[in-house]
Amino acid sequence: MNENFPTMSFEEKYEEEARVNVDLRKALELLERASEAHKNDDIDQAIELYRESLAYCPTADAHTYLGWMYSIQGRLEEAIEECHQAIEVDPEFGNPYNDIGCYLMQMEEFEEATGWLEKAKDAPRYDPRHFPYLNLGRILLKQGKHGKALGELYQAARRAPEDKSLRHQLVELIALLN
């Protein structure tokens, strides 16, 4: 799907600078190790590695993923703060906008969450692009705004056509509205 703005991958963001910046190269190496620790459910180790990565060279990615680890531990305020720091480092990175929206949803601050999710939609460097649409759809469903929720879920499904569970949710909502 073609968005109305240029997109940038992780590699495009860091590849060239990492060739000449040894601190960034080490930070990215630690970021990868932290990701592996997370995949292995070692959240404490992931937190330590994300912090170490940030000490070498602050990246929006490390701040965002550190925030994610905090959220897993129920530390939502700290998670939100990490996302704000990520946005300061790279305002084009969409994940922290979506993540703030998700954390606010968990805190049942739906109106505030909506604004962050809308910002995530427009971020050039963001994958998976369908998440803010899906999350806005969830908020709208909670608010009983089924027609608007359908529009958001439709947009999510357009951006992730391979996601069968998303298509199933869309079909269920259509059936509910009929």
Image (tube, rainbow, N blue to C red):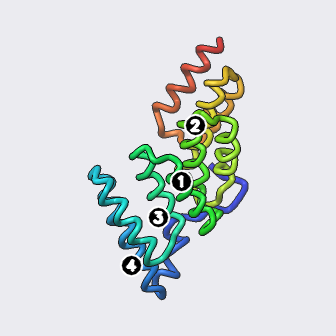
Mark 4 lies on residue: 26
Residue found at x 60% / y 14%: 176
Q: Earlier in the sequence, mark 4 or mark 3?
A: 4
The disc label shown at residue 94, or none: none
Answer few, some or many: residues within 10 Å of disc 1's Cα (few below 14, many 20 plus, some between 14 and 19).
some
To which quarter of the image does residue 151 belong?
top right
Residue 168, given in percent of the width and then of the height, sits at 50, 26
Q: Secondary structure at mark 4?
A: helix
| Placement of 154 over or under 32, stated as above or below | above
Question: Can residue 146 be seen in this snapshot?
Answer: no
Question: Can residue 106 be seen in this snapshot?
Answer: yes
Residue found at x 54% / y 65%: 60
Answer few, some or many: residues within 10 Å of disc 2's Cα (few below 14, many 20 plus, some between 14 and 19).
some
Discs 4, 2 touching: Cβ within 8 Å: no
Q: Secondary structure at mark 1?
A: loop
Residue 13, given in percent of the width and then of the height, sits at 55, 71
- At label 1, which amino acid type do we have? Asp
Q: Depth check: give the residue in front, 124 or 1.
A: 124
Residue found at x 62% / y 62%: 87
Q: Nearer the viewer, mark 1 or mark 3?
A: 3
- At label 4, which amino acid type do we have? Lys
Discs 4, 3 touching: Cβ within 8 Å: no
Mark 2 lies on residue: 105
Mark 1 lies on residue: 127
Q: Which corner quadrant holds the C terminus?
A: top right
Q: Secondary structure at mark 2?
A: helix
